[in-house]
Image (cartoon, helix red, strand yellow):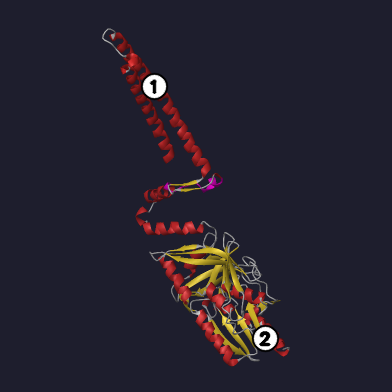
Amino acid sequence: MFWILCFELCAYLGFRVLVLRIYIFMSFIIKSKYLTVKKERPWLKKIGWVFLVFILMGVSFGAGLYLPGKTEFAKNLAAKEVEYTGKVIGKYIFFSKDNFSQDVNFNLYWNLWDALKENYVDKDAIIDKEMFYGSLKGLAASLGDPYTIFMDPKMAQEFDEDMSGKFEGIGAEIGMRDEIITIIAPIDDSPAQKAGIKAGDKIIAIDGESTSSLTVDEAVKKIRGPKDTTVILTIARNGAEELQKVTIKRDTIIIKSVKTEMKDGNIFVIRLTNFNGDTADAFDKATIEVLKKNPKGIILDMRNNPGGYLETAVQIASEWIEKGVVVSEEFNNKTKNDYQSDGRARLKDYPTVVLVNQGSASASEIVAGALKDYKKATLVGKKTFGKGSVQTLKDFDDGSSLKVTIAKWLTPNGYNINKQGIEPDVDIDLTFDDVKADKDPQMDKALEILSKAVDGR
């Protein structure tokens, strides 16, 4: 638009300059030797001035006809520019004509803002900051990625508490699966697990309110609450014909991400529940314990592990993988970032079985996929959740944060598990009846495999 205005101005000034030049030219002629007016011929001077006046009138009339036409032409040109170039108005960012759908007029945002404040029935209850943060949440949600979310300062603080391993709620990780809020994994010994919640349960309603229009973070806020309060989840479970209503009493959730146990037959079990801020140090202590006790084999139990920090996953996988890529990030421009083993590989000589199920997601899938590709472990259980994307956290000055998906990750063999999951080497289920009967056929199978591996060495 700036250049169009310049074009119009130049056109207008151009005609004024033309008139001025004609005036100077005629003045020069009148005063020149070609039209030198002598005293004996004064009528010739009068004719010259009359002629000049007529020329100036004609030029002015022509300019009056020409300039409106140029203005209309400029308007048409502007209309064509908006229609075909696809630009973000007022942001000095221009797109090719193929990106017409990218046209954005940011005035609409403020028009909507003003319309809400002027017309909303409870306008006195409107809080500007809540409106502003709500619009930012919607902006992040518009990408359609359930793992890309804007968190206001309160949500960002809750997220930090989650990653530190302490919060109040029911103790279950949730995500989006087929556009339905789904339990990824209940935390060990949590109220959710004690109430019978299982990985894969679909949350249809929270306290009677449908979850069909809720985002993951909105569902989390409704499920969480102070200790000793209750929440009722209406769930749909695979294999069950009817919906179930489960009442859960909230509690303080303290996550101990690494637990160890020595099983009969000198088999060492490392239970890995999360990849939190304390996990790397806790796993290092568990590794030192393994080296001291020198077991015949190791069971790495990552069932219902919802994931966490990528770097921690790489560190843990490196305890078995001596050299090579543990996981690769693939970005939107198809470039890759390979995470190499740190070379410690202190557990590489121990026969290992990894336990996984439908609740094993994200970082736990990175570890399982790497150990499977390098043939460092046998995977036992059920197919994993299939969350193969990587998020980064960007903090803002007001305490808010953006968790945004920046890449998808690939196993060392180039396999992308997103929405597909990792198939175990030995497929075996753990049913609700097994849990009630205090049975664990997956663990039993892992012990059987290691016993045979040790005997065969």
Is 100 contained in the magenta span? yes
Which image quarter: residue 298? bottom right
Kind of residue sitting beneath label 1: Val
Across and down, in percent, residue 203 comes to 56, 67
> In the image, which is nearer the foreground, mark 2 or mark 1?
1
Separation (CA) of disc 2 from disc 1: 102 Å
Q: Quadrant of the N terminus?
A: top left
Residue at the extreme front? 33
- Left or right: 106 with respect to 326? left
Magenta span dominant secondary structure: helix
Dot 1 crowding, Cα within 10 Å, few <14, some 14–19, many 20+: some
What's the residue at 61%, 73% (across, down)? 325
Residue 336 visible, this angle? yes
| Residue drawn 43% across the image and 58% down it | 134
Residue 116: give x, y in percent of width and height. Answer: 40, 50
Quadrant of residue 25 within the rendered picture: top left
Left or right for 79, reference 443:
left
Q: In the displayed image of the protein, which residue is found farthest to the right?
A: 456
Q: Which mark is residue 288?
A: none
Residue at image coords 48%, 34%? 76
Is residue 308 visible from the viewing direction of this image?
A: no
State the residue position of label 1: 59
- Give the residues in magenta: 98-107
Q: Is residue 454 above or below residue 4?
A: below
**Percent from the top left, x then y, of residue 95?**
51, 47
As helix, strand or loop, the secondary structure at mark 1 comes to helix
Foreground pick, 221 / 306: 306
Residue at the disc numbered 2: 447
Which amino acid, by three-letter code, is at mark 2?
Answer: Leu
**Rendered-image quadrant of the C terminus:** bottom right
Where is residue 97? Give x, y as percent: 54, 44
Mark 2 surroundings: few (<14), some (14-19) or many (≥20) residues within 10 A = many
